[in-house]
Image: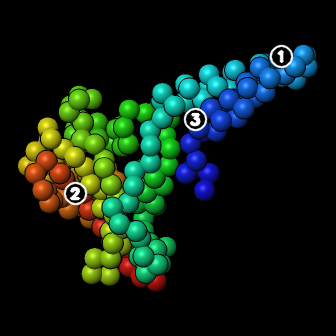
Amino acid sequence: MLPKISLAAVGLTVGGILTITGFVAYALDYATLNLAGFFYGIPLVLGGLALKAAELKPIPFSQPTSEKIIALRNQLATPTQNQIRKDVTRYRYGQEAHLDESLERLGLSPTDEERPVLTSLLEQDWEGKYVLTLTFTSPFISLETWQEKQEKIAKFFGPDLEVTVAEPEEKVVTVNLISQLALP
């Protein structure tokens, strides 16, 4: 639940309330409340604004995950799949884009402007295997480049994963991270 809440929004809300309380207390000549409102409220508002400027919103799922898929995930998902899913579905601060460092290390992000942008996630059952599908908008990196990096992507994201790359529509690339773990 907490990763779904923006710290920037919390800072702005609490800071705004305290600051307004400080102004009202100043107008009503309540010195102690006035000081508390100003000394705590204004820094919280400024902190909230700074966080808002550095905020990276969570990536949505392209469709809701069914209970069957959640059960499959709990049994077969690799630690890497779980980490990716958790990281990209929460607010992040101070990063340029989701998976920016990973894309850079894989050679899929020559510059910030050319970096593919993660747009959605999808969890699915593919022949009894758990699959985490990452959908990227990739106007500058061709499908051929993604396919050349397919083996490197599989090694990068760890053991027990098979990777497939597809282009369902022009300038959109899907990366399927397929768990190779067997049911217990």
Residue identified by numbered label 3: 8
Amino acid type of the residue tagged 1 in the rendering: Tyr
Going by the image, does 124 lie left or right of 175? Answer: right
Looking at the image, is 115 positioned above or below residue 31?
Answer: below
Tell me the number on the disc at residue 2: none
Residue identified by numbered label 1: 26
Which is closer to the viewer, label 1 or label 3? 1
Which is closer to the viewer, label 3 or label 2? 3
For the residue pair 100 and 80, the one nearer the viewer reads as 100
Residue identified by numbered label 2: 174
Q: Residue at x 40, y 68 (%)?
A: 64
Instruction: Tell me if I can see residue 142 in this picture.
Output: yes
Q: Earlier in the sequence, mark 2 or mark 1?
A: 1
Amino acid type of the residue tagged 2 in the rendering: Thr
Q: Earlier in the sequence, mark 3 or mark 2?
A: 3
For the residue pair 13 and 29, the one nearer the viewer reads as 29
Q: Residue at x 62, y 51 (%)?
A: 2
In contact (CB < 8 Å): disc 1 and disc 3: no
Q: For label 2, count other residues whose C-alpha is less than 10 Å away and answer few (under 14), some (14-19) or many (20+).
A: many
Q: Earlier in the sequence, mark 1 or mark 3?
A: 3
**Toward which corner of the image does residue 128 lie, by quadrant?**
bottom left
Q: Can you give x and y, in whole percent of width and height, for residue 176 in the image? A: 26, 62
Q: Residue at x 39, y 55 (%)?
A: 60
